[in-house]
Amino acid sequence: MIQLKTPQQIDGIREACHLTARLMNSLSSYLEPGMSTHDIDQHCYDFIIHHKGKPAFLNYEGFPATACISINEEVIHGIPSRSRKIALGDLVDIDLGINMNGYFSDMARTFIVGGVTKPEWDKLCKVTEKCLVVGIEAAGKRNARIQDIGDAVFKLANSHGYGVVRDYCGHGVGLAVHEEPEVPNYTSSYMPNPRIREGMVLAIEPMINLGTKNIRESENGWTVLTADGKPSVHFEDTVAITKNGLEILTVED
């Protein structure tokens, strides 16, 4: 069942999202070659606790860290470790949420370590970020439906020959880490297609691969990788549908 949020609940979710955006925006200057993914995760944990929040992903369904940190061919759900180091030119996807007094955020950004990478990887990042933009724009249109988001994302990614991940998708969020509805990045006549209504809070998150759309799971039971070993990029924002229209919540206040 889709949970429509009251304006007061959206206020609480907004607070969590603003804090998440502050953390996420700080990471672009924090990341350095040679740093371990554990270092990054610890930084995120310390920031959240310092600001009196709780890491929303930590221990969620057994996940052992504050942030999902996925590098290059890792699509999502990378587990931080002391042994995994980031290198110049790596694509580092950091996906996390914050629980502030029972209100939840969800946000992801893919960072280029050192700011420079292979041209085709850089293009993948730019197109995937644009996929997020067009997905959000589609959600904010009058009388929009959930699959309008996936239609916009898929058409843009497909026009560049990229693979659009189908096995994982965006979702409702706000009073829990994951809620209905699912928000796919493609369309299908077999999937539900509810109208987007005031009170919905959605995590829109394109996951776009340089090569095939197909994925595989790693032996750790969490990390999802591209089937062909080519890189993947992931961007995500939490948005709310209010009486004044769509609002992107994962921005700094």
Image: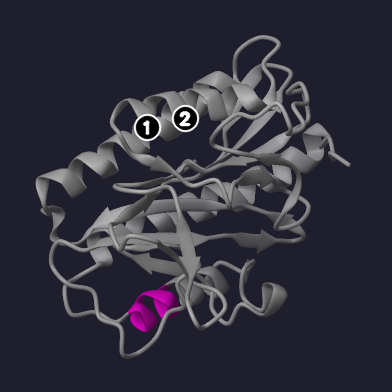
Please tell me which residue is depicted at 33% across the width and 39% down the height of the picture.
162
Q: Is residue 38 magenta?
A: yes
Q: Whole-Å distance between the Cαs marked 2 and 1? A: 6 Å
- The image's colour scheme reads one colour
Q: Main secondary structure of the magenta part?
A: helix
Where residue 54 sits, quadrant-wise, is bottom right
Query: Is the C-beta separation of discs 2 and 1 under 8 Å?
Result: yes
Q: Is residue 49 magenta?
A: no
Q: What is the magenta range?
A: 37-43
Most extreme residue toward the bottom is: 83
Above or below, comparing residue 60 to residue 205 in the picture? below
Where residue 129 sits, quadrant-wise, is top left
Most extreme residue toward the top is: 142
Above or below, comparing residue 247 to residue 204 in the picture? above
Picture coordinates of residue 100, whole percent (x, y): 68, 60
Residue at mark 2: 153
Please tell me which residue is depicted at 37% across the width and 48% down the height of the picture.
212
Q: Residues within 10 Å of mark 1 (few under 14, many from 20)?
A: many
Q: Amino acid at mark 2?
A: Val
Residue at mark 1: 157
Please tell me which residue is depicted at 53% across the width and 47% down the height of the picture.
18
Label 2: state its secondary structure: helix
